[in-house]
Amino acid sequence: MRAEGVKSPLANVVLSCVFYLASGPTLILVNKTLLTQSGFSYPIALSSLGQLSSFVICFTLIHVFGFVESSSKVSMSFWLTKILPIGLCQALTLNLGLRAYMFLSVAFIQMMKAFSPATAMLASLMVGKSISREQIIAVFVICTGTLIAAFGEVHLDMTGVFYLAVAEVAECTRLVMTQTLLQDMNFSVVESLSVIAPASFFWLIIGSLIFESAEMRLNNATGIIVQYWHLFALAMTVGFFVNVSGYWVIKSTNGVTLKVLGTARNGGLITFCAFFLGEVITTREVLGYMISIMAFLVYSFLQVKNIRDVAAKVPEEEIKEKEKELSGEAPPESEIKQEV
């Protein structure tokens, strides 16, 4: 069944969000283990594996089993001008985002990611997307809480912060372009991933060949993959689910909602890291992040309200159009088609 085939708009949003919240933390912890404990400290190569698995699975679903219909054909010029830039932004996001885990704790990175809804919101406003005043206020309260949490961090590495900041800028740019592709171009979720994943893999594999291949040969990276094959297989599989759920959320809502959902998801991951991984979290960090979570709940309420309002307006608009047609104010649909 196609993810976007869920009939109810609200059910579609809830399912996509739940799927996204469940898959993300698993991938973060697996990637953290591979980068810091297995000896495979090559974030570009690790990121490329997830994109490769996403493309292979989507291609198989569409062209081999026919489980997902392909509604459009992508020309080479379209792929080069529309898809390849999205792949570049995603490659930068994955590479630099993973690289940050080599310098900062998992908990602190999740707190800093609460800033991303603001940058995603600003990017959306710049391209003419509609966001309510209440949602803008909620997003900035989230960022205020994140600032408070940042001042409470005891192990701050500016190199890791720089990588994280550049990754977030690239991610927000990707979100705006992807949202346009999914919503305005009417691409399905799996179809979008099948054309975007190769573009991202293209940039990542080039980066890995330039910056990592020599060291990988010296350190027998192939042997590490064989030794920890189960973790790599898990990372590739979960990476596919993360990609699908991310595109699904963007299609059913927008890019800002995806980032705000990530903020809430990170709260659970922070708690897990504190209790089970032994990472140090200060009282100020907890206070700041609780402010962010409260603002997230407000934003979620506003988003659900907007979805219900839009769903309620659709039948009313159709009734008005029919009334105009019957009263002679608007030409029948058959006449419009004949004129065209």
Image (cartoon, helix red, strand yellow):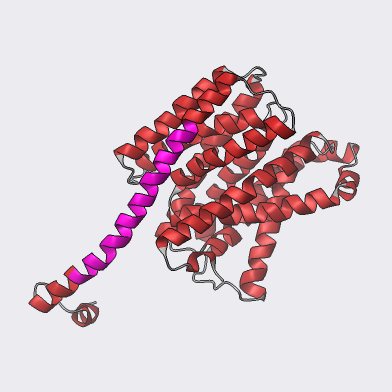
What's drawn in magenta, residue-wise?
Answer: 292-319
| Residue 76, image x, y percentages | 55, 62
* Identity of the residue drawn at 61% across and 50% down: 22
Whether residue 154 is visible to the viewer of this picture, yes or no, is: yes
| Residue 168, image x, y percentages | 54, 35
Q: Quadrant of residue 39?
A: top right
Q: Is residue 175 left or right of residue 9?
A: right
Q: Quadrant of the C terminus?
A: bottom left
Q: Is residue 84 left or right of residue 278?
A: left
| Residue 338, image x, y percentages | 22, 82
Q: Quadrant of the N terminus?
A: bottom right
* Identity of the residue drawn at 64% across and 50% down: 23
Q: Is residue 241 left or right of residue 74?
A: right
| Residue 262, image x, y percentages | 54, 42
Q: Nearer the viewer, residue 51 or 268?
A: 268
Whether residue 199 is visible to the viewer of this picture, yes or no, is: no
Q: Is residue 95 above or below residue 56?
A: above
Is residue 192 found inside the magenta-colored segment of the image? no
Number of numbered discs overlaid on the protein picture: 0
* Identity of the residue drawn at 48% across and 26% down: 145
Q: Is residue 92 above or below residue 284?
A: below
Q: Nearer the viewer, residue 322 or 334?
A: 322
Q: Nearer the viewer, residue 276 or 340?
A: 276
* Identity of the residue drawn at 60% across and 74% down: 67
Q: Is residue 16 above or below residue 155?
A: below
Q: Is residue 38 left or right of residue 173?
A: right
Q: Is residue 249 above or below residue 128?
A: below
Q: Quadrant of residue 310?
A: bottom left
Q: Main secondary structure of the magenta part?
A: helix
